[in-house]
């Protein structure tokens, strides 16, 4: 088959085809470490990072236990409204052929090379020395590669967006707002504008895990509360609210 006839996949496509590349244990929601709770943790972690940098002292979490929709709202600086796509959609390098891949040093991860060669799909993300890179390998051959000159703090959020039936992120920063909407990992809309007077800065993320690519799941309130309590215990001074009720440390 010629290269021009090969089907081209984006990195979000790979994540949806092989969600266990993002979260090793998918689960059905009964386990504390099942992926739906790791998705929630990934979004909360971004808000915690804002607090650690001195911005925002409250995080609101809301969960619809019937539909599976989750929402996290912080009151930090908000993400750059012009960069929401870069931050919340997994990037790809446009499709890389095997001939494009080279190394100028001995491979320090020979075991990982074996795994990649014997896997139908293999995804690697790395943040090191101020750079961010993501590589997708398909049946032992590099399929796409993307690199940025600065570390991206929302790499976990890009996994959440790829594996969600619906995903919305709204940022308010410096008197401007940005709103990005995705469906099944694909962009639906992206708009920006000026905020009204008195609009508080911050970041709102709302998503529903996609049951078409993840196992059928049930959200267990006990697991959600425990995860938030652990976050509160690890971050004194940061207030957490779940469905309007403050959650104290363990």
Image (cartoon, helix red, strand yellow):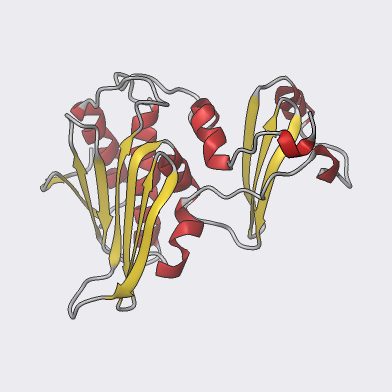
Q: Quarter of the image holding residue 63?
A: top left
User: Which residue is at the far left?
Assistant: 245
Q: Please tell me which residue is depicted at 33% across the width and 64% down the height of the picture.
A: 171
User: 16 or 33, which lies in front?
Assistant: 16
Of the 4 image quadrants, the one containing the N terminus is top right
Q: Is residue 95 above or below residue 5?
A: below
* Residue 22 located left or right of residue 194: right
Give x and y (percent) for residue 111: 75, 25
Q: Is residue 185 above or below residue 53?
A: above
User: 234 or 53, which lies in front?
Assistant: 53
Labels in figure, total = 0
Give x and y (percent) for residue 178: 35, 66
* Residue 223 located left or right of residue 146: left
Give x and y (percent) for residue 106: 88, 39
* Residue 100 located left or right of residue 121: right
Q: Quarter of the image holding residue 62?
A: top left
Of the 4 image quadrants, the one containing the C terminus is top left
Give x and y (percent) for residue 154: 47, 52
User: Which residue is at the far bottom?
Assistant: 197
User: 113 or 64, which lies in front?
Assistant: 64
Q: Please tell me which residue is depicted at 83% across the width and 37% down the height of the picture.
A: 107
Q: Please tell me which residue is depicted at 85% across the width and 41% down the height of the picture.
A: 99
């Amino acid at each position: 088959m010629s290269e021009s006839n090969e089907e081209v996949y984006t990195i979000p496509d790979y994540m949806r085809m092989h969600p266990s590349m993002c979260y090793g244990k998918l689960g059905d929601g009964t386990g504390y470490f099942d992926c739906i709770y790791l998705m929630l943790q990934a979004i909360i972690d971004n808000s915690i990072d804002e607090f650690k940098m001195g911005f925002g002292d409250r995080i609101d979490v809301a969960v619809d236990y019937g539909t599976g929709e989750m929402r996290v709202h912080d009151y930090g600086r908000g993400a750059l409204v012009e960069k929401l796509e870069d931050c919340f959609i997994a990037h790809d390098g446009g499709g890389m052929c095997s001939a494009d891949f080279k190394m100028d040093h001995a491979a320090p991860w020979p075991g990982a090379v074996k795994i990649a060669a014997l896997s139908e799909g293999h995804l690697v993300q790395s943040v090191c020395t101020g750079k961010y890179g993501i590589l997708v390998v398909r049946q032992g051959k590099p399929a796409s590669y993307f690199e940025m000159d600065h570390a991206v703090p929302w790499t976990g959020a890009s996994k959440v967006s790829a594996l969600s039936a619906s995903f919305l992120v709204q940022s308010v920063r410096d008197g401007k707002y940005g709103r990005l909407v995705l469906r099944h990992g694909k962009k639906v809309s992206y708009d920006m504008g000026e905020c009204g007077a008195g609009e508080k800065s911050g970041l709102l993320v709302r998503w529903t895990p996609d049951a078409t690519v993840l196992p059928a799941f049930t959200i267990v309130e006990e697991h959600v509360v425990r995860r938030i309590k652990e976050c509160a215990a690890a971050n004194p001074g940061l207030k957490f609210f779940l469905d309007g009720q403050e959650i104290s440390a363990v």
